[in-house]
Image (cartoon, grey):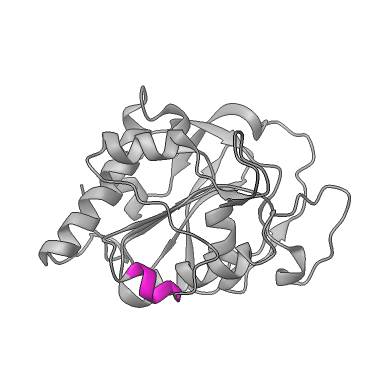
Amino acid sequence: MWSAKVQGMRFAGAAVAAAVLRSIDRAGGEPVVLFPGSSESAAEQLSRLDGVVIPGGADIDPRRYGSEPDEHYWPADHPGQDDYEAALLRACLDSEIPMLAICRGMQLLNVIHGGTLLGHLAPGAVEHRGAEHPVTCEPGTLLATVLGDAPVRTSSYHHQAVDRVGEGLRVAARATDGVIEALEVQGARLLAVQWHPEDLAGESASDHAIFEWVVEAARNRRTGVPAPKETGTLEAMAV
């Protein structure tokens, strides 16, 4: 993520939450930070990697899904951030590179598939910004093979949410108020979650399992292990 200000630096920089990097390392992976201003294409950058984690961040430009910015809109520091991450998402899907998309990453996945977002969640039964709440996976999904069917505790920090689900996407989890908490793409080694698994991965077995899944899927792709068939309609790597 391009950041206009990084402590100790005179100019803009590329920043990733340390919790995300620690979670990847804890799961056995080696995190590498990609530069969003690279002269290489997304496909060229990804040619040297085994898997991708797209972390959370600022809001997606609402004009990408047919809306307009309002007083709640929190733009990214880099005007090309949306285009850059959208290209990464598409390149991962095209190249079958295992991917974990977190919060903003899940929302962008929905948008590039023609879906829309709710620009700002009104206060309701579940607090989604700066709170913990339960999420339940849909049976038969890849996420359910990783986390199980029982509700899991999640750390949530978002003021937007998926509205219309994009073409080719499947809802994989919801909060108790009905807010969509995970999406999947049929046949893809992809987990896309609305919550921040990095927040609790050091103490939560379910959040750690998400990072273990993407690291293991990346390792299997590198060594040529095919993704096995699920019992449901999706094709994915089961942990």
Q: Position of residue 136 (x, y in %)?
A: 46, 39
Furthest-front residue in this view = 10
Inspect this view and state whether residue 14 appears: yes
Q: Residue at x 19, y 64 (%)?
A: 221
Residue 44, magenta (yes or no): yes
* Prevailing SS of the magenta stretch: helix
Furthest-top residue in this view = 203
Inspect this view and state whether residue 187 appears: no
Where is 41 relative to 56, above or below? Answer: below
Camera-nearest residue between 56 and 239: 56
Residue 61, magenta (yes or no): no
Q: Position of residue 194 (x, y in %)?
A: 54, 46
Q: Position of residue 169 (x, y in %)?
A: 49, 67
Q: Residue at x 37, y 77 (%)?
A: 94
Where is 94 relative to 78, above or below? Answer: below
Where is 133 relative to 235, above or below? Answer: above
Camera-nearest residue between 39 and 156: 39
Q: Position of residue 30 (x, y in %)?
A: 27, 46
Q: Is residue 40 left or right of residue 96?
A: right
Q: Range of the magenta residues? A: 41-46
Q: Residue 146 is drawn in which quadrant?
A: top left
Q: Residue at x 58, y 62 (%)?
A: 108
Q: Is residue 44 left or right of residue 115?
A: left
- How many numbered discs sit on the rendered protein? 0
